[in-house]
Image (cartoon, rainbow, N blue to C red):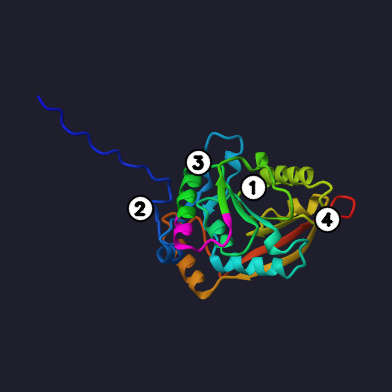
Amino acid sequence: MSTPPKKAATRRLLPGLSVKDGYTVHPFDLKYGVRTSGLIAGRHLGVGHAHDKHNTAYYGVAPSVLKGLVKVWRESGPLGSVEETTFVDIGAGMGRAVLLAAEMPFKEVIGVELHKTLAKIAEKNLARWRELGRARTSMRVVNIDVLEFEWPSGPCVAFLFNPFGAVVMRRLMLRMAEVFEGRQGELDLLYVNDEQEVVIERQKGWKRFFVGKIHRSREDAIADHRIMANQPEGEYASTNSEDCSGWRWVGKERS
């Protein structure tokens, strides 16, 4: 008696990445053949880590917002030129910010992502970016807790799209202060949807060089409004701009 063929295993998508969950493709993905769309609530991003309960959500930053904030940073007088600076995306998710930053002449672009599945998707996106010839610099994704990340030498700019709550933010600030002690000016922080800005304000050693709204392009605004409108639970909303802030590490003795 012949054995019936086994059915192919159905891949289970993270909640928020299927059509029934309101998954809607962003024009960025359609244009470049990458996979950075989707909205995953923080409660679905657990990996068995102590920080799981402090996750916010996964959502790719609007390209126009990241580019606008990087422009503000470049005009703020950072210690090193963009060519001397490493860009670090904290909570990189599927890597949209990494891809966008790699189009700029940074020394290197690194995505730090704790969720293994998201990190794997990001790695595939990076491979696609290289195939397209869009990367102007080296880029990589590390699957690790950001508190264990080994910061590179030289000037760095850290990017956050509100990846976690106050508890982890405080721990990250303490870790940064420890690593960059004696390295005044070598770390800048670009924060989109800066809900935990007060945590940075209370941490000695940081000086704010920007606070304000960065507006989405018309294309990004239309796309994000459409994506949010398709969410079945209506848990999130989109506006035409993001509240952002920029910070520079000046050292505790100068703050």
Q: Pointers 3 and 2 in contact (CB under 8 A)?
A: no
The tag on residue 165 is: 1
First in sequence, mark 4 or 2: give its number: 2
Mark 1–mark 3 Cα distance, whole angstroms, equals: 20 Å
Mark 4 lies on residue: 250
Label 1 amino acid? Gly
Residue 165 location, x and y as percent? 64, 47
**What is the crowding at mark 3: few (fewer than 14 residues within 10 Å), some, or many (at least 20)?**
some
- Is residue 161 visible in the rendered structure shown here? no
Q: Pointers 1 and 3 in contact (CB under 8 A)?
A: no
Label 4 amino acid? Val
Quadrant of the snapshot with the C terminus: bottom right
Secondary element at image label 2: helix
Label 3 amino acid? Lys
**What is the crowding at mark 2: few (fewer than 14 residues within 10 Å), some, or many (at least 20)?**
few
Secondary element at image label 1: loop
Quadrant of the snapshot with the N terminus: top left
Mark 3 lies on residue: 116
Q: Pointers 4 and 2 in contact (CB under 8 A)?
A: no
First in sequence, mark 3 or 2: give its number: 2
Mark 2 lies on residue: 20
Query: 196 or 163: which is nearer to us?
Result: 163
Residue 244 location, x and y as percent? 67, 63
First in sequence, mark 4 or 3: give its number: 3
Q: Nearer the viewer's eye, disc 1 or disc 3?
A: 3
Secondary element at image label 3: helix
